[in-house]
Image (cartoon, coloured by chain):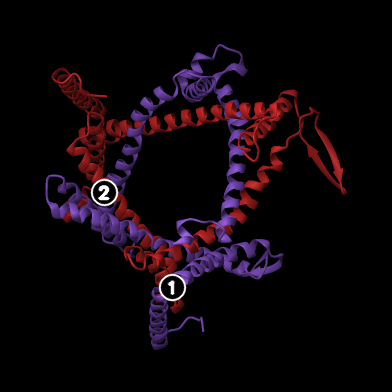
Chain colours: A purple, B red
């Protein structure tokens, strides 16, 4: 049944699938409160079951797309799943776009001095969407390619880099507050940040060039990053891993309570 | 118009980049209309790019083409399942959107096992390092000769520091019982200090990264844009002069504002 079709058969199957989907949606809308909870639990469990089974089931040598590999009967479906899941999650992009549309349409309809911002938003969004999609088609015109280049390389890239560089100014004020020496912890934070920053620039390296090699600021910086920063980050990461595993298990088995499963 | 744009695309691109850069930097004086416009321009372009990229890089090759061109009719179910997200806009049936959200929560939970085994678990055994200095040696295990690199005294001390820090930081996050035992209490305290080193290093690196971006924008204005707009030789100097004038105007306006209303400001 789940084989590729062509011509009239394809249209027939598509029509059948649409009808089946409508029936499914109608059934879902009629479900009572208690049944909804079970639907949510089942879908969540099935979503995790594939990857859990693929991981836990014993493996053996097998051929996947003509290549020798180690796996079980679910392993050949890992790549198709990796293609399907991004496509499925991409539909969520529309939620954000609809939200922005609702907000800016309201602002345009009010029509005051701030509405110009929303008009700029709409024009920029539509231009970029059309230009990028047209530019990605086979044999795009020179006009489309140039327009896409101006919008992406000229405007978007510049705005992106500038927006993030503005943070440099604000982070300086934040640094002043964070780095005030008030406690041992704040002193350690201050000292490490200064060493890391000075060790990265020439003037810092110049300041300590007359000291013994092991006291050169770039050497101290490197030691801090590899021998202090790395193990602390590793310990945090391992804790994070154990935490996400525990939370994952709770969600997968429907043990997590709260607004998701309850209402 | 079309020909003009195609012929001068590179010059227009540099002008657009410079105008956008200066437009956003105008916020450094104060929140103003020009900044708001460029902020919305950024938002619009970024949204448009996200929408277009989602279509060209994900939905078109992974969903539409297999369904439409390769005859995989059952891919229509991806579209139907994906449309469940949009039930969030229905007050009565918004719970249907939780089906797909739940599916992805389940997928993420299932993948957590693999992520733990592949990403986090190997970090635990690799944190146990040799702490006794030794010269370069060879050992034979099951007929296989393995060379072990020399471990100097400094290397051994570094390894010990590494292990102590891993232990102490993990101890800090150990909340299963009250940390009353002096060994546990003090190692957790040491762990907190070590994390301060880490956060300081991360903060320092973040500041440097942001400053690098700022330097990159100034370099763009002076060299790339300056050369394109005012010629090879004096381009950078001219733009530098213009920037100085702009900064002087901003400074004058700021000082004037301060004199008029000294209580305002941060």
Q: Which label is found at residue A240?
A: none
Crowd band around label 1 with a 10 angstrom C-alpha radius: few (<14), some (14–19), many (20+): few
Identify the residue position indicated by label 2 in the image. Answer: A150
Above or below — where is A73 with respect to B31?
A: below
Q: Relative to B60, does residue B135 appear above or below in the rendering?
A: above
Closer to the camera, A234 or A140?
Answer: A234
Is B104 in front, or is B122?
A: B104
The residue indicated by pointer 1 is A32
Left/right placement of residue B86 relative to residue B8 reads right
The quarter of the rendered structure image containing the C terminus of chain B is top left
Chain under disc 2: A
Q: CA distance from mark 1 to mark 2?
A: 54 Å
Name the residue at 24% across, 30% down.
B235
Q: Quadrant of residue B158?
A: top right
> Where residue B197 sits in the image (x, y, percent)?
55, 27
Whichever of labels 1 and 2 marks the residue nearer the N terminus, that label is 1
Q: Residue at x 36, y 68 (%)?
A: B93
């Amino acid at each position: 049944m789940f084989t590729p079709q062509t011509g009239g058969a394809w249209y027939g199957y598509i029509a059948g699938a649409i009808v089946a989907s409508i029936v499914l949606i109608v059934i879902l809308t009629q479900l009572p409160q208690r049944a909804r909870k079970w639907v949510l639990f089942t879908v969540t469990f099935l979503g995790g079951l594939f990857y859990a089974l693929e991981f836990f089931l014993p493996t053996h040598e097998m051929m996947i797309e003509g290549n020798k590999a180690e796996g079980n009967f679910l392993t050949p479906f890992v790549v198709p799943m990796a293609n399907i899941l991004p496509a499925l999650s991409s539909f969520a992009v529309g939620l954000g776009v609809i939200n922005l549309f609702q907000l800016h349409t309201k602002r345009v309809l009010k029509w005051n001095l701030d509405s110009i911002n929303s008009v700029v938003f709409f024009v920029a969004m539509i231009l970029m969407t059309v230009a990028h999609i047209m530019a990605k088609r086979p044999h795009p015109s020179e006009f489309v390619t140039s327009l896409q280049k101006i919008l992406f390389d000229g405007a978007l890239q510049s705005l992106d880099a500038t927006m993030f560089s503005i943070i440099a100014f604000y982070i300086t004020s934040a640094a002043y507050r964070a780095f005030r020496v008030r406690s041992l912890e704040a002193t350690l934070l201050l000292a490490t940040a200064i060493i890391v920053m000075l060790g990265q620039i020439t003037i810092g390296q110049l300041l300590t060039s007359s000291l013994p090699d092991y006291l050169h600021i770039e050497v101290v910086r490197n030691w801090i990053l590899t021998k202090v920063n790395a193990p602390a980050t590793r310990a945090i990461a391992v804790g994070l891993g154990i935490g996400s595993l525990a939370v994952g298990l709770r969600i997968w088995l429907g043990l997590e309570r709260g607004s998701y499963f309850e209402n | 118009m079309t020909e003009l744009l195609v012929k001068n695309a590179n010059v227009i691109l540099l002008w657009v980049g410079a105008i956008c850069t200066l437009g956003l930097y105008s916020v450094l004086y104060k929140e103003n209309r020009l900044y708001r416009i460029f902020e919305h321009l950024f938002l619009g372009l970024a949204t448009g790019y996200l929408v277009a990229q989602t279509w060209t890089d994900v939905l078109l090759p992974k969903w539409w083409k297999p369904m439409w061109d390769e005859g995989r009719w059952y891919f229509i179910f991806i579209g139907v399942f994906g449309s469940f997200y949009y039930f969030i806009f229905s007050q009565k049936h918004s719970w249907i959107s939780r089906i797909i959200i739940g599916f992805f929560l389940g997928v993420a939970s299932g993948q957590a096992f693999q992520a733990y085994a592949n990403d986090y678990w190997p970090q635990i055994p690799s944190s146990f390092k040799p702490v006794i200095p030794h010269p370069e040696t060879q050992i034979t295990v099951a007929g296989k000769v393995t060379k072990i690199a020399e471990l100097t005294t400094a290397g051994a001390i570094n390894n010990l520091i590494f292990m102590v820090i891993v232990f102490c930081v993990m101890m800090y996050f150990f909340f299963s019982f009250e940390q009353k035992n002096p060994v546990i209490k003090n190692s957790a305290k040491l762990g907190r200090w070590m994390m301060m080193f880490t956060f300081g290093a991360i903060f320092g690196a973040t500041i440097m990264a942001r400053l690098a971006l700022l330097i990159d924008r100034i370099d763009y204005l002076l060299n790339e844009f300056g050369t394109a707009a005012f010629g090879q030789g004096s381009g950078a100097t001219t733009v530098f002069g213009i920037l100085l004038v702009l900064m002087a105007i901003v400074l004058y306006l700021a000082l004037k504002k301060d004199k008029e209303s000294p209580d305002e400001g941060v």
